[in-house]
Structures are given as structure tokens and as C-alpha cells.
Amino acid sequence: DLQQKINFAIKEAFEREGQLIVRADLPGLTKDDIKVDITDDAIKIRGERRQEQEENEEGYYRSERSYGSFYREIPLPSSANREQAKATFRDGVLEITMPASARQPSSRRIEIGETAETEQPRAKSKAAGR
């Protein structure tokens, strides 16, 4: 099996000035080797690296091919505007940007109330009937 996993690093994922930015290092690839899909809750980056090497020297010829695929899924915050996402690829770095609205705090404190006193059913023991 010639297929091997290709590891790549998610270099950065952050929000700045109302933009969500994700950067991934993909050295040795071209933009045609990479596919980016956005779902309701994630960015999916996948692709394949194909490498061919040939040597033709005195008395022998050697040809070597290797293939490898990769896939990463990066969760998106609910504040990301997926419809306006854009991707660029330059010098081996994939950059995906999209507007992200300011997040509102999603937690709140709740008060703990008193429970009404109700009679708890009593457990019957074997010794009680003797």
C-alpha cells in the first residue's frame, strides 16, 4: 500500500478585528491539491500529495512514485459567517478568513431555590415486621 498519511500543522486559528482566521502549513502542495469545505459547524480541509521522481543515469533508469492524503476538521464558533468565507494559498500556507461577530457571554448564573418539604417514603426492613 503506497498511500501514507501526510501530517500538516494548523499553524493558527484566531479572531482579529472581527475576522476568524485559520492558517495551515501545507508545504510542497499547490492549491489544486487542496479542497476546503465549510459546514454549519466546521472547516474541512482535505487533499492529496503526489510525488514522482525519475533518475536516468548511465546504465539504469529509476522511477519512484508516492502518494498520500490528508484530512483535518476544525470546529467553527457559532459567531462565524460561513457564507462570506474566503481562502487563499501562498508559499505553502493556506489561509481561510471569514467575518465573525462579537460573541456575547453565553453563561449566566441561576439561583438555587428551596425545595418543598415532602415526606420521603420509608424503606421497609425485614426486621420491622418481627
Image (cartoon, grey):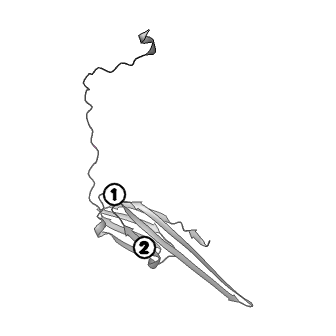
| Residue 109 falls inside the magenta stretch | yes
Q: Which residues are magenta?
A: 101-110
**Disc 1: which residue:** 77
In terms of secondary structure, where does tag 1 sit? Answer: loop
Q: Quadrant of residue 53?
A: bottom right
Task: State which quarter of the image contains the C terminus.
Answer: top left
**Direction from residue 55 to residue 14 in the image, left or right:** left
Q: Position of residue 13 (x, y in %)?
A: 40, 61
**Disc 2: which residue:** 35
Q: What residue type is disc 2 on?
A: Lys
Q: Residue at x 75, y 90 (%)?
A: 59
**Magenta-colored segment: predominant secondary structure:** loop
Q: Residue at x 39, y 64 (%)?
A: 43
Depth order, front residue of 44/22: 44
Q: Position of residue 93 (x, y in %)?
A: 45, 71
Depth order, front residue of 121/107: 121
Q: What residue type is disc 1 on?
A: Pro
| Residue 107 falls inside the magenta stretch | yes
Depth order, front residue of 6/124: 124
Q: Position of residue 116 (x, y in %)?
A: 24, 24
Q: Quadrant of residue 109?
A: top left
Specify the farthest residue to the front: 130
Badge 1 or badge 2: first in the primary sequence: 2
Specify the farthest residue to the top: 130
In terms of secondary structure, where does tag 2 sit? Answer: strand
Mark 2 is surrounded, within 10 Å at the Cα level, by few (under 14), some (14 to 19) or many (20 or more) other residues, namely few
Q: Residue at x 30, y 57 (%)?
A: 78
Q: Position of residue 94 (x, y in %)?
A: 43, 71
Specify the farthest residue to the bottom: 58
Question: From what the image shows, is residue 49 above or below residue 114?
Answer: below
Mark 1 is surrounded, within 10 Å at the Cα level, by few (under 14), some (14 to 19) or many (20 or more) other residues, namely some
Measured in 3D between alpha carbons, the distance from the residue under mark 1 to the one under mark 2, in whole angstroms, is: 21 Å
